[in-house]
Amino acid sequence: MTLSEQYIAFMTIVRKEIKRYLRIWTQTLLPSAITMSLYFVIFGSLIGSRIGEMGGFTYMQFVVPGLIMMAIVTNSYSNVVSSFFGSKFNNSVEELLVSPTPNYVILMGYVVGGITRGLFVAVVVTLVSLFFTRLHVHSYFIVVITVLLTSTLFALAGFINAVYANNFDDISIIPTFVLTPLIYLGGVFYSMDLLPDFWAGVSRLNPLVYVVNAFRYGVLGVSDVSLTLAFSMITGFTVAAFTFSMHLLNSGTRLRQ
């Protein structure tokens, strides 16, 4: 395929993904806004007023970056895992695999679709947060890079989950038993400085710690981990996930009947 044909194929997949989640926006976009509003009310207004400051900021300001990142992670992941598994379930993905479309174009089409949903929800959640607190972004560059890397990483993770899933129940196992615990133990609601040395060391094994803290630094200018280490970890995980995803597509593992 020529580059122009590859671009057409890529944009076709991206447009399909965007239309898919916008068509059912009450299931894909609205729940995040409602859930995050409840988090802001409970953890920010009710509990936050009792906790006081954390990291030199009000508790509400401290948790907002983590909650925004939580919305990005879950939506980027869930968009790709549900969409690609649906294509695999009805065998339409086989038509893509036998077409002249390069595998990396197929992969990036689904990934960018997941990224756009993550970004869309991030904007919605950020606007909701402004009703509860005031945000002064420390570094727009770090914010943008963190959001793009993180949404790419978890869109790829959703793709891998979709490839290995055998039924619709399988696509909920990882988000429920792996992703959710990692998010809640990733420093969204607390600073690692509050943890004993042992548990702080254990927390550093959690990739979500680096995601949340990199984004928090971009918004507030504070972080519990080195920014260089955070970006190194996020980039490393993203490259590994992309390489493995391409291997699954090229080998046809669990894709071709």
Image: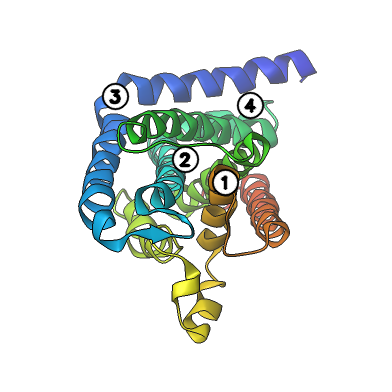
Q: What percent of the width, then of the height, locates residue 5?
A: 71, 15
For the residue marked with disc 1, what is the amino acid? Thr
74 vs 205: above or below: above
Choose top left, top right, bottom left or bottom right for residue 12.
top right
For the residue marked with disc 4, what is the amino acid? Ser
What residue did someone put label 3 on?
24
Q: Name the residue: 27% across, 30% down.
A: 30
Q: Badge 3 local density, few (<14 within 10 Å), some, or many (20+)?
A: few
Quarter occupied by the N terminus? top right
Q: What percent of the width, then of the height, locates residue 256?
A: 53, 45
Structural distance between the alpha carbons of marks 1 and 4: 30 Å
- Answer with mark 1 or mark 4, whichever residue precedes in sequence: 4
Label ID, residue 150: 1
What residue did someone put label 4 on?
99
What residue did someone put label 2 on?
76
For the residue marked with disc 2, what is the amino acid? Ser
Evaluate whether residue 2 shows in this view: no
Q: Badge 2 local density, few (<14 within 10 Å), some, or many (20+)?
A: many
- The answer to the question of whether label 1 and label 2 lie on touching residues, with beta carbons closer than 8 A, is yes
For the residue marked with disc 3, what is the amino acid? Ile
Q: What percent of the width, then of the height, locates residue 219?
A: 54, 43
- Answer with mark 1 or mark 3, whichever residue precedes in sequence: 3
Structural distance between the alpha carbons of marks 4 and 3: 29 Å
Q: Name the residue: 54% across, 29% down.
A: 95
Q: What percent of the width, then of the height, locates residue 109?
A: 59, 29
